[in-house]
Image: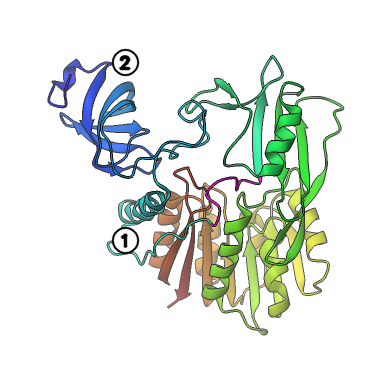
Amino acid sequence: MNATSASSDLNIGQEVELFTTGMAFEGQAVARLDGHVVFVDYAIPGEKVRARLERKKGNVWFGRAVEIIEPSTERVEPRCPYFGECGGCQWQHIDYAAQTRLKTEIVRDQLRKIGKFTDAPILDTIPSPAPWYYRNNIRLAVTPKAGLAFARRRSNTPVVIEECVVSEPGINRRLARLQGNARGSHVSLRSSQVTGETLVEIQGLEGEASEQAYHEELAGRRFRISADSFFQVNTHTAEIIVRELQQRLTLGDTDRLLDVYAGVGTFAALFGAGVREVVAVEESRSAVRDAMFNTLHLTNVEYIHGRAEDVLPSLKPGFDAVIVNPPRAGLKTEVAEWLLANPADRLAYVSCDPATLARDLRLLVDGGYSLLDIQPIDQFPQTYHVECVAGLRWK
């Protein structure tokens, strides 16, 4: 069937020929078929492909490229033998320079569609210094035969792996020793190329002694990170995030800095020596314990454990600068409202999700902030995910 066939005849499992014209937010190429939008996994804009239709939602079909009839010049051979089976990477078939360009376009598209920004000041995506072997943290399932596995895309079906080409060498060394010998339900592996330390955490096995913490080094400072604590997954680009924050916040020694969703104290530890005071808010108890250790060299940092929406109303207002680094779901409504009711001169928003970033920036700009720029950073090479740092000023 070709792209002019009657859409009423379409069925799950059917193969159709499509010409892809763009890239969607979750990494699928976009095509149109008789009035339907079709999202195609493992295709690239500008290609003619044969795709198998796998599911439908409303008037939108989702499929998978099974044959590349006319390939893009930006198509490359995937490095990983599990690519297309394992759901961890979606873009290994795309040249790396093209990946960063597409991520810029995705951010711009989300700011336009969701944030209603007609001409958002979006800069070109900064590439990762290491597009391979960069991940410092992975989580795998333990299969019934004790093999460690990732899941297929949009499935719980395990894909047992021997090596992950986007994970740090230290993780792959631990994986090789554990593969076929693991117990429990899940295993998390962490590693630092700088310190050489690794961490193994085993879940779902009572009494199993997992390693409790390891150390990472970022921007010349060492951080303790517990098994339950969040840390940026790409240490190389985490240093770029720090640099981009410094440029947008222009902190001085009289400034009061508020760090919301502060994690293990990364920004508090790195910026604290250059300001008068840091107040950091974090919900994870293990991250707060790490942060207290990581900021021992500073006497002007106050770390508060609790949800941001609960803690912020109790704070003394008058902050000169604010950093927010929320999870993928973005800012809670109460947090955005507090930021607008107690505005700082400078605000920097670190986001791992362009859709929720676009939503929240619209709230902040409508409430009185000016959007200076948005800097995408490729924190997650070989995937569609993208990190952003947005700079704002109070009008």
Q: Nearer the viewer, residue 313 or 69?
A: 69
From which residue to which does the magenta span run?
129-136
Q: Give the residue displayed 57% in from the left and 54% down from the top.
A: 326
Would residue 130 be counted in the magenta stretch?
Answer: yes
Dominant secondary-structure state across the stretch colored magenta:
loop
Q: How is the image coloured?
A: rainbow
Q: Nearer the viewer, residue 109 or 49?
A: 49
Near mark 1 (Cα within 10 A), the count class, few <14, some 14-19 or many ≥20, is some
Q: Give the residue displayed 46% in from the left and 71% down from the top.
A: 392
Q: Quadrant of residue 324?
A: bottom right
Circle nearer the viewer, 2 or 1: 2
Q: Mark on residue 117?
A: 1
Position in image of residue 232 (x %, y %) = 62, 52
Q: Nearer the viewer, residue 327 or 227?
A: 227
Helix, strand or loop for disc 2: loop
Would residue 108 be counted in the magenta stretch?
Answer: no
Left or right of 353 in this view: 263: right
Q: Give the residue displayed 35% in from the left and 40% down from the top.
A: 75
Position in image of residue 118 (x %, y %) = 27, 62
Q: Which amino acid type is marked by label 2?
A: Gly
Near mark 2 (Cα within 10 A), the count class, few <14, some 14-19 or many ≥20, is few
Which residue in the protein does label 2 denote?
Answer: 13
Q: Which amino acid type is marked by label 1?
A: Phe
Q: Give the residue displayed 41% in from the left and 69% down from the top.
A: 371
Q: CA distance from mark 2 to mark 1?
A: 38 Å
